[in-house]
Image: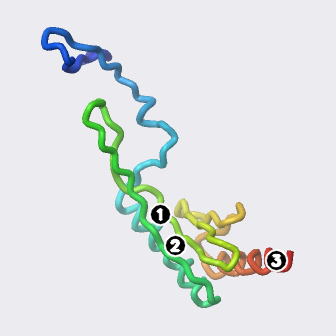
Amino acid sequence: MNSPLATSPSPHPHTQRPIEDDSTALTSGRPPILADAEVALRMLLLAELQAALVELGFHSVLARNQRLVLQYNQRPCEPSGLTDPDLHIFTPDGTGIATTDGATYALPGGRNCPVSDPGAAAAILVRSHRVAQRA
């Protein structure tokens, strides 16, 4: 079945309808599925940031994200699996979300900080929160 156009069952027993091989469905803007080792690394890095935030009096929750695709009528269907984890940081002003790509922390408000110094990233978050409180 090397044809880019396959067929699938139709509601009518003697006809088949074409299914196009649409690889753009696999890149539909959804977060990519990550390897288990990559997710574990990112979770560890976010846990280090979480610990640094606890030392400064901030509460946060580390959340794994999983994309689950339940499609029985479309082939190929998009893959299911773990995506980028988030650290939800709670402040009196609301909740901010921090993520990491393994090299830098992406902090709420658009700031970035290297993962080699989670204490500095936590300090940036605390400073930006205090500046927001004064405004």
Q: Are marks 1 and 2 in contact (CB under 8 Å)?
A: yes
- CA distance for labels 1 and 3: 27 Å
Tell me if mark 1 has few (under 14), some (14-19) or many (20+) residues whose alpha carbon lies within 10 angstroms of its own. Answer: many
Q: Which residue is mark 2?
A: 46
Q: Residue at x 34, y 53 (%)?
A: 81
Disc nearer the start of the sequence (1/2): 2
Residue 39 location (% of width, % of height): 41, 62
Q: Which amino acid does the dot numbered 2 rest on?
A: Leu
Disc nearer the start of the sequence (1/3): 1
Q: Which residue is mark 1?
A: 85
Looking at the rendering, in which quadrant would you find the C terminus?
Answer: bottom right
Looking at the rendering, in which quadrant would you find the N terminus?
Answer: top left
Asked where in the image residue 90 lies, by quadrant, the reply is bottom right
Q: Which residue is mark 3?
A: 131
83 lies above or below 1: below
Q: Which amino acid does the dot numbered 1 rest on?
A: Pro
Q: Residue at x 63, y 82 (%)?
A: 119
Q: Which amino acid does the dot numbered 3 rest on?
A: Val
Residue 47 location (% of width, % of height): 49, 77
Tell me if mark 3 has few (under 14), some (14-19) or many (20+) residues whose alpha carbon lies within 10 angstroms of its own. Answer: few
Q: Would you say 4 lies left or right of 126 here?
A: left
